[in-house]
């Protein structure tokens, strides 16, 4: 049997799919090894959200071919879906498998190793895909990422995800539950629900995201101490979902909500499905229920036509918004998108400068948020003996020697960058119910 190394670029869905592929390869008798180690096959799962991600894919492919010229290289992922020919030209690449091929990739790799014919339909487009591939990944047996939804029916002018991932589709609730129970049996303390457009969960089964949350809450044993939502669109974050999270202590008071711009003019050009007023109302709805919730924001700077006034409008909006941190992205032209053809493209150096301004704002907001949490009991899932993550998404440093456990902590007020120092509290302080201050 073969030694196979895997490497992932991009989102949590890609990581979940890589981990699922690894389990399938192990079940077929192969050995998984590190990317830097000698291997018979190297599998790269790519991203296409930015041109930097594409450049990194090419760099990794060239590095691995120089290091292991006789190894076979397999490339998959979103970049492979959209531009397979660009990847096939790289030396050493034996197979380019699109996202639509991922459910059959383990078989294709096995056939490649054994020199058996195995045809992948290279004409299949993601937009035609109706298949859902259930996937999950785990981090050190503490936190697991469970993919419950894939694809997107939105048509944002800057985004290639619908072409790379296909239409919105979901796993049936009973299938998600079965995988969540498997993760519980493996000892994971936290399960993070992930998707391309998570709040759109339910297609084509006629169910809803709220129904899925209710099913997991009732059916998954208490050994899973925490559930967390990944990114969710503001127009899909309903009061009913917020009320459910508020009423059930296992669901983390942490919400990551894409904004992209604080300018209504730019939100319109981006073809987003909301405007500033709705976004601000959703943030206030969270804060009314969870004064100490962690709230993250995605922002794109330097979108075509973004003037200094537009950027300043976004900056002021974010300064006043009671959020905890920002994920800032300089706009990256994506071939085939509407925005790539827009006039008034912003110079790259201006995009970078604006990115730095908002990243500095994010750093300040994270520290202001941490200061607001001082004096309150938080609960950290310890990923190592001395580092963990709280329910409201603060990374904390607290020497405990108790990796894999959830422990009560309090922040000390000191920090190392964006990692906050804390002290562990006695077990008598621990409560399975959320502290009232976090409700």
Image (cartoon, rainbow, N blue to C red):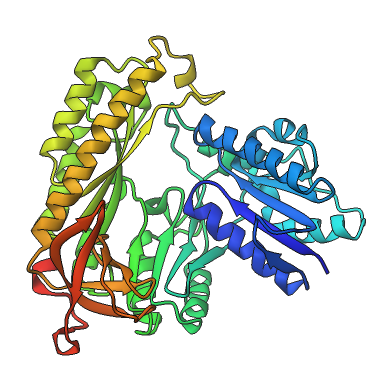
Residue drawn at 44 percent across, 77 percent down: 188
Report if residue 189 is visible in the image.
Answer: yes
Q: Position of residue 29 (x, y in %)?
A: 78, 73
Q: Nearer the viewer, residue 144 or 63?
A: 63
Residue drawn at 20 percent across, 57 percent down: 415
Q: Can you tell which quarter of the image residue 300 is in?
A: top left
Which quarter of the image is occupied by the N terminus? bottom right
Q: Is residue 164 left or right of residue 31?
A: left
Report if residue 439 is visible in the image.
Answer: no
- Farthest residue in the bottom direction? 428
Q: Can you tell which quarter of the image residue 320 is in?
A: top left
Is 423 drawn above or below residue 325 in the view shown?
A: below
Q: Nearer the viewer, residue 197 or 223?
A: 223
How many tags in the picture? Answer: 0
Q: Position of residue 82 (x, y in %)?
A: 64, 34
Which quarter of the image is occupied by the C terminus? bottom left
Q: Is residue 418 left or right of residue 145?
A: left
Q: Position of residue 248 (x, y in %)?
A: 23, 73
Residue drawn at 67 percent across, 32 percent down: 83
Q: Is residue 153 left or right of residue 297?
A: right
Q: Position of residue 342 (x, y in %)?
A: 43, 14
Is 67 drawn above or below residue 36 in the view shown?
A: above
Residue drawn at 74 percent across, 48 percent down: 74
Is 77 drawn above or below residue 36 in the view shown?
A: above
């Amino acid at each position: 049997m073969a030694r196979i190394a895997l490497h992932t670029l991009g989102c949590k869905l890609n990581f979940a799919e890589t981990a699922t592929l690894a389990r399938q390869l192990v079940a077929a008798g192969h050995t998984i090894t590190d990317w830097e180690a000698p291997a018979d096959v190297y599998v790269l799962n790519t991203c296409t959200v930015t041109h930097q991600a594409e450049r990194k894919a090419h760099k990794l492919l060239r590095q691995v071919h120089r290091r292991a010229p006789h190894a076979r290289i397999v490339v998959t992922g979103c970049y492979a879906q959209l531009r397979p020919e660009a990847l096939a030209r790289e030396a050493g690449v034996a197979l380019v498998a699109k996202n639509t091929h991922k459910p059959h990739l383990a078989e294709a790799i096995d056939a490649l190793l054994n020199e058996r014919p195995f045809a992948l339909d290279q004409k299949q487009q993601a937009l035609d895909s109706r298949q859902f591939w259930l996937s999950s990944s785990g981090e050190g047996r503490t936190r697991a990422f469970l993919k419950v939804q894939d694809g997107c029916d939105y048509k944002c002018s800057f985004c290639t995800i619908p072409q790379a991932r296909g239409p919105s589709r979901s796993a049936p609730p009973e299938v998600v539950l079965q995988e969540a129970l498997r993760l519980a049996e493996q000892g994971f303390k936290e399960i993070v629900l992930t998707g391309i457009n998570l709040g759109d969960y339910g297609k084509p089964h006629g169910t809803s995201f709220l129904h899925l949350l209710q099913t997991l809450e009732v059916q998954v044993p208490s050994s899973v101490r925490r559930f967390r939502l990944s990114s969710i669109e503001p127009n899909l974050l309903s009061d009913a979902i917020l009320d459910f999270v508020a009423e059930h202590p296992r669901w983390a008071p942490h919400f990551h909500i894409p904004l992209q711009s604080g300018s209504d003019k730019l939100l319109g050009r981006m073809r987003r499905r909301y405007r500033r007023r709705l976004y601000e109302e959703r943030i206030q709805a969270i804060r009314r229920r969870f004064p100490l919730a962690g709230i993250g924001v995605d922002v794109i700077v330097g979108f075509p036509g973004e003037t200094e006034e537009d950027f300043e409008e976004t900056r002021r909006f974010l300064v006043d918004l009671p959020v905890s941190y920002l994920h800032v992205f300089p706009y990256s032209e994506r071939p085939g998108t509407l925005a790539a053809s827009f006039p008034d493209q912003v110079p790259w150096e201006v995009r970078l400068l604006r990115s730095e301004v908002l990243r500095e704002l994010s750093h300040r907001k994270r520290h202001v948020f941490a200061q607001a949490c001082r004096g309150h009991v938080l609960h950290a899932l310890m990923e190592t003996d001395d580092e963990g993550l709280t329910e409201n998404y603060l990374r904390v440093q607290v020497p405990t020697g108790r990796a894999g456990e959830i422990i009560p902590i309090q922040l000390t007020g000191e920090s190392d960058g964006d990692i906050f120092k804390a002290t562990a509290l006695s077990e008598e302080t621990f409560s399975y119910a959320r502290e009232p201050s976090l409700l």
